[in-house]
Image (cartoon, rainbow, N blue to C red):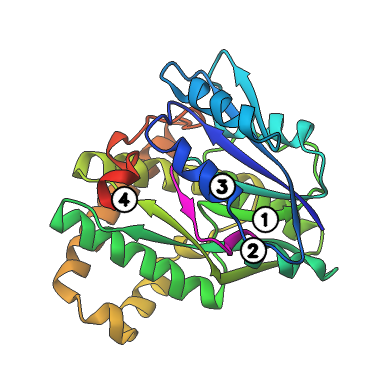
Amino acid sequence: MDVSIGVMAYNEEKNITFILEALLKQKTKHIQIREIVVISSGSVDKTNIIVEKIAKKNKKIILIKEKERKGKSDAINTFLKKAKSDILVLESADTVPNKETIECLCLPLMKKENGLVGGQPIPLKGQSKLLNRIVQLQWQLHHRISEKKPKFGELIAFKKIMGEIPPTAADEEEIASIINKEGLKLIYEPKAIVYNKGPETIKDFLKQRRRVYAGHLDLKKRECHEASSMNWGSVLRVAFKDKIIRKDLPWLFYAIIFETIGRIIGFIDHCAKKNHYVWKIAKSTKDLNKTK
């Protein structure tokens, strides 16, 4: 099974080497990574130079440079047009996968009824004790929720059944809604581990949560598709029933407070019809090397 991987990048000089090296070193038996397409949109740092240097040594790496940054969904549409495989993988440029992640992610798509598979993001330890615990809890909750009803982010594989996606700030869930409407199943594969870095400041945390919630509200309004983490009742039930998460009860309350603030701001943005298609970067999430 041929697979094309898309990496959407904007000023990712601190992490682009890590992700490309990790993708080139993937252990595969049943799939073949045909190409790794980097869509660099408006990058003004050393991202393009680094990718070009790696591409000279490996023909699987393809760099597409876009002068203007029009948002991740626009970059994804460029990838959809250029990708040569029927199975596509989208991975955030500020993440790093395990050695067997791409194969674990793609294997369920060999079944006709499956249309999209999401991996498990695991945050690396950050410098801020408060934000580190909040981010760890956040992704633990996403993992527990996804075991019952998949919630997608950071890394997905899907069958190429669409030519493009609409402008969105919730790209993975947007693709999930399209796949779901075609009658194909949405799958969560926890063995497909991808490492990311959470925000190190409250400002960056709120910046992320605001954008994500506003994007999910927009998607829900347009397509009647709701991410599983949107339901407060489901989130709180998982949080207080899960023994592992319950051990960090003091941190959990902080997480709830900050998440609530982020959702309130996101709701205000949604009501004001403010889109986050070209979102503001949370700079403290960009250097995974500092967490290793």
Q: Which residue, given by chain and number where applicable, does mark 3 sit on?
A: 91
**Label 1 close to label 2 by CB (< 8 Å):** yes
Is residue 21 a member of the stretch shown in magenta?
Answer: no
Give the amino acid at mark 2.
Leu
Quadrant in which residue 254 is drawn:
bottom left
Across and down, in percent, residue 124 comes to 32, 57
Q: Residue at x 73, y 66 (%)?
A: 29
Query: What residue is pinned by disc 1?
Result: 157
- Disc 2, SS: helix
Q: Earlier in the sequence, mark 2 or mark 4?
A: 2
Q: Is residue 69 above or below residue 227?
A: above
Residue type at mark 3: give it: Glu
Read off the magenta span.
94-103
Distance from disc 1 to disc 2, alpha carbons, whole Å, reads: 6 Å
Tell me the residue that label 4 is attached to.
198
Label 1 sits on a secondary structure element that is strand
Single out the mark in the foreground, 2 or 4. 2
Q: CA distance from mark 1 to mark 3?
A: 9 Å
The alpha-carbon separation of the residues under discs 3 and 4 comes to 16 Å
Question: As drawn, is 171 to the left or to the right of 235?
Answer: right
Mark with earlier residue (1, 4): 1
The furthest residue to the right: 112
Q: Mark 2 = which residue? A: 105
Question: Along the polypeptide, which appears first: circle 1 or circle 2?
Answer: 2
Who's the residue at 34% across and 46% down the image?
288
Q: CA gap, disc 1 to disc 4?
A: 22 Å
